[in-house]
Image (spheres, rainbow, N blue to C red):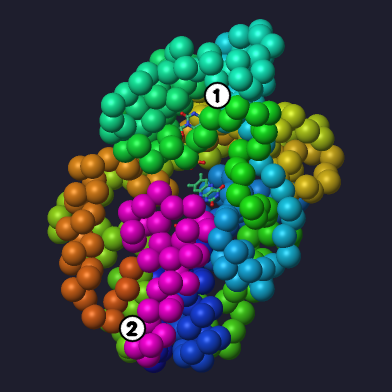
Amino acid sequence: MRFEYVVVGAGFAGCTIAERIANVLNKKVLIIEKRNHIGGNAYDYYNEDGILVHKYGPHIFHTNNKIVWDYLSNFTKWRLYQHRVLAYVDGKYVPFPINLDTINILYNKNFSSEDFKLFLETVRKKSEKITNSKDVVTSQIGEELYEKFFQWYTKKQWDIFPDELSPEVTARIPVRFNRDDRYFTDRYQGVPEYGYTRLFENLIDSKNIHILLNTDYKEVINEIKFEKLIYTGPIDYFFDYKYGKLPYRSIRFEFETLSCEYYQPVATVNYPNDYDFTRITEFKHITGQIHPKTTIVKEYPTSEGEPYYPIPQNENYEIYRLYEKEARMLTNIYFVGRLASYKYYNMDKVVEEALKLFEKIKFTS
Ligand code: FAD
Ligand code: UDP
């Protein structure tokens, strides 16, 4: 077999770069994917009751990057969906991220935005330096709200308390002085109208792209003739763990289909202080599907299993940098994506990085 490019992994990173190489450079690409489907962690499918579900947990596309949005819009129409989340705290369901209504409901108050700001001034910790994910939160909302909303959710999700995690983890979550209860405020938000898997099918629908599923690239790579390799799997695996294993956090997803039209009022309810799962998501809120039944998923974080989340801690980044240095010295081998970069990237950032990599390699081919 002869290809100009081999791409390892059929997620957003792999399929984006494969599409560009095949359609812009008109080169032959082989994608090797170890799972039995394309789409990486964004894969979705219709379950046995005919409800569209996300196999690896809820995925909502959101970005401020017009280039990324316009690029993907060539391959899908969008359902313009805005994600909403409630947190179950002190026996009440309150909007999350914390906003004016959250505080008023939780503390039975009637604060204005100004009152809320003054209140936070009295409770927030005036830290000199923000060095971890706890500082990020307590410097904005103080210890009590931190404990109610962040401490135990984070412990469940990462098996680490926020003070041992890099700041970028909880920095994903804003505090709002208004009543905006959307989870994201990016300019472009939605889900592919016919699902993510259809979007991926469209991305790689080219006579120049071949795909090999159910195959770990290491099993076949020596039998394939190629000029360049793009790798989107875990970077430590590529180098046979020579600097040690990078830790990843995994999740066990427990799906349930219920004989009622809706189970909860919004797509996701977070349970920071109750149960072993972190959150329950009900897909029909996200997809807009009309169906007499409904499917929910509970997320149980685990240390074993598929690598979903790089763990943002300095010691892990140090190991990653050893691999990164090694990767930079290779010619004609490129690393892109969440696992290959060991970064807590959202989908839009992965597409952005893949498009940037394409700009870099197109001049060398
Ligand atoms: P992946 O999607 O992981 O794809 C990598 C592919 O490489 C996989 O299919 C894997 O099987 C394959 N592979 C690995 N090793 C090998 C090998 N040795 N040989 C062959 N193939 C291999 N992002 C958002 O923007 N919005 C969200 O709402 C959101 N929600 C999320 C919820 C959860 C529970 C999780 C885990 C992630 C979420 N994300 C979300 C992040 C999103 O999933 C990632 O940013 C995105 O999927 C990363 O794409 P990728 O191509 O880099 O990696
Ligand atoms: N987080 C929290 N409480 C919540 C929601 C999030 O403490 O109710 C923290 C937690 O550490 C989590 C991080 O904020 O890992 C980022 O949350 P996000 O919803 O962005 O996580 P993802 O959707 O990527 O799992």
Any part of residue 124 in sight: yes
The residue tagged 1 is 271
At label 1, the amino acid type is: Tyr
Looking at the image, tell me whether mark 2 or mark 1 is earlier in sequence order.
2
The residue tagged 2 is 228
Q: Quadrant of the N terminus?
A: bottom left
Which of the pair 210/58 is nearer the observer? 58
- Helix, strand or loop: magenta stretch: helix
In the image, what residue occupies the spot 69% across and 11% down? 110
Any part of residue 155 in sight: no
Apparent side of residue 353 relative to residue 328 in the rendered image (left or right): right
Q: Quadrant of the C terminus?
A: bottom left
Whether the residue carrying mark 2 lies under 8 Å from ligand 1 is answered with no
Compute the Cα span from label 2 to label 1: 46 Å
In the image, what residue occupies the spot 60% across and 15% down? 115
Q: Position of residue 125 (x, y in %)?
A: 37, 18
Q: Is residue 304 above or below residue 18?
A: above
Q: Is residue 57 above or below residue 298?
A: below
Residue 164: name its quadrant.
top left
Identity of the residue furthest to the top in this view: 108
Which of the pair 329/11 is nearer the observer? 329
Q: Position of residue 244 (x, y in %)?
A: 17, 51
Q: Secondary structure at mark 1?
A: loop
Circle 1 residues within 10 Å: few <14, some 14–19, many ≥20: many
At label 2, the amino acid type is: Lys
Q: Position of residue 272 (x, y in %)?
A: 50, 23
Q: Is residue 97 above or below residue 304?
A: above
- Check residue 274 for magenta coloring: no
What is the span of residues highlighted in magenta in the rendered image? 336-365
